[in-house]
Image (cartoon, rainbow, N blue to C red):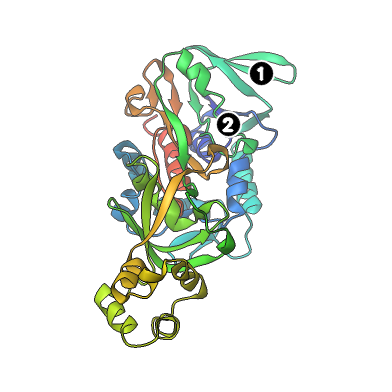
Amino acid sequence: MKSVHIVGAGPAGLMAAYQFALKGYSVLVYDHKSAPARKFLVAGQGGFNLTHSEDLELFLSRYDAQRIQDVVRGFTNEDTVHWLQSIGIATYVGSSGKVFPERGIKPIEVLQKWLTALQRLDVQFFFNYSLVDFDSEKLVFKTDNGNKEVFYQRSVFALGGKSWAKTGSDGSWVSFFLEKDIQLNPFQSSNSGLEMVKPWQDLAGKVLKNVLLFNEYGEKYGEFIITDYGIEGSAVYFMNRFIRKKTFPQYIYVDLKPNLSREKIIESISSGKISEVLKKKLRLEPVKLAMLKGLDKATYTDPVLLADKIKEFPIELTGFRPIDEVISTYGGVEWEELDAQLFLKKYPAIQCCGEMLDWDAPTGGYLLQACFASGYYTALGI
C-alpha cells in the first residue's frame, strides 16, 4: 500500500488525510501539538461558519489569488456541505448566507465526527511531533524522546500561518523553508482590527450597525465594533485588503446613513432642530449621535457640513493589530515555488496546502473553505 505523511492536523491537513485515505493510501498525520485542529476549535468559539452559500463566482472573487480561486473551484462551498453531510454533520444557512452546523452542534462535535471518519479509514496520528527539517527522502521531527527521522514516499505539508500561536499556528517552519531557498512572502496581519490615531475609548464596546465602511479602493456594508484601540468586526476585516493598498497613517470612512442620499439628509437637517432631526427623523442610534457630537461646533451646526460627515465620517488609522491576535495571516509560500498540483518544485514529493500558501480572504467561511479545498486538491490526480 502506498503511504503519505501529512504534517499538520488542522483543517487542510485533516482534509488531505481524508481524501488520501479514501483513495486507499496508508495515511500518517503528524502535529506538534498534543491534539488536532486547535485553531479550528478556537475559531469556532466566535460563530462557527464553515463556508458561505453565495453564488460560486461571487464566492471566488473573495480570494485575492487566481491560484487559490482555481483550487476552490475544484472543491466548492456546495462540496463542503455535501462532505459535511457525509460525515454526519447537518448544516443550515444563516440570514447572512453563512453556512453553520445544525443548531446545537458544537465545534468539538464537528471535529469528533471528522476524526471518527478518519479512524474508520485507519488514519494514524502522531502528536507532539514538531517538524524541524526535511530533505527529498526524510522528515525530521523533534519529539519528547529526541529527534526522529521518518522516510517518506509522498508528503503533504499543512503547516499553517502565523496567528494565534497558542493553537500551534506559529510560523516556526518559515526559517527552515528559507534556508532551503524556498521563497516566501512575509506573513502579515489579515482579518485584523484597525488601530486609530484617537480611539473612541468612551464608546468602546458599542456596535455600529447598518453602515457602509469604505475607502477609494473598496467598500463593505454591514457592522463593526468600537474598541479601546480602534475598530474591528466583519466589515473591518473585509476592508483589510483595501487598506493595505496605502501606507499608514491613512483614512477610512463610514457612511452612517447609507440608505439616504446626501441631499435628503441636508433637507432633513434643515427642517428643524438638529439634535431632534438626527434622533427622530434620521433615527440615528445613540452611538452614531455620540460620534457626531464629537465634531466641532461649526461643522455640527451647518446642515451641509454635517451631512458630509454623516455620509463620509473620517476615521484616521495607524495600523493593524499585532499579528498573533488576528484571525488569519496573508503571505506564505509563493505560488511560483509550486507546480500545478501544489508540489514544491525543489522537493517534488512534497505538497503544500492551507494557510501556509500565499493567499488572503475575509472571514465568513472563506478561510476554512480554502483550507478544505486545498487539502482536497492534494489528493487529486493520483
Q: SS at mark 1? A: strand
Specify the amino acid type for callout 2.
Asp
Residue with the mark numbered 2:
170
**In this rendering, which labeled residue sits more in front, label 1 or label 2?**
2
Mark 1 packing: few (<14 Cα in 10 Å), some, or many (20+)? some
Specify the amino acid type for callout 1.
Lys
- Residue 209, percent from left and from top: 46, 68
**Front-most of 109 and 50?**
50
Q: SS at mark 2? A: loop
**Front-most of 175 and 86?**
175
Residue with the mark numbered 1:
142
The image shows a total of numbered marks equal to 2
- Residue found at the far right of this picture: 145
- Residue 352, percent from left and from top: 45, 28
Q: Earlier in the sequence, mark 1 or mark 2?
A: 1
CA–CA distance in space, label 1 to label 2: 16 Å
Name the residue at 51% across, 34% down. Answer: 161
Decide if residue 72 is on the left or right side of residue 285.
left
Q: Is residue 217 visible?
A: yes
Name the residue at 57% across, 25% down. Answer: 172
Residue 51's disc is: none
Decide if residue 5 is on the left or right side of residue 130.
left
Q: Are marks 1 and 2 in contact (CB under 8 Å)?
A: no
Q: Is residue 205 visible?
A: no
Find residue 70 and report its image quarter. Answer: top left
Task: State whether residue 135 is above or below residue 335.
Answer: above
Find residue 228 and report its image quarter. Answer: bottom right
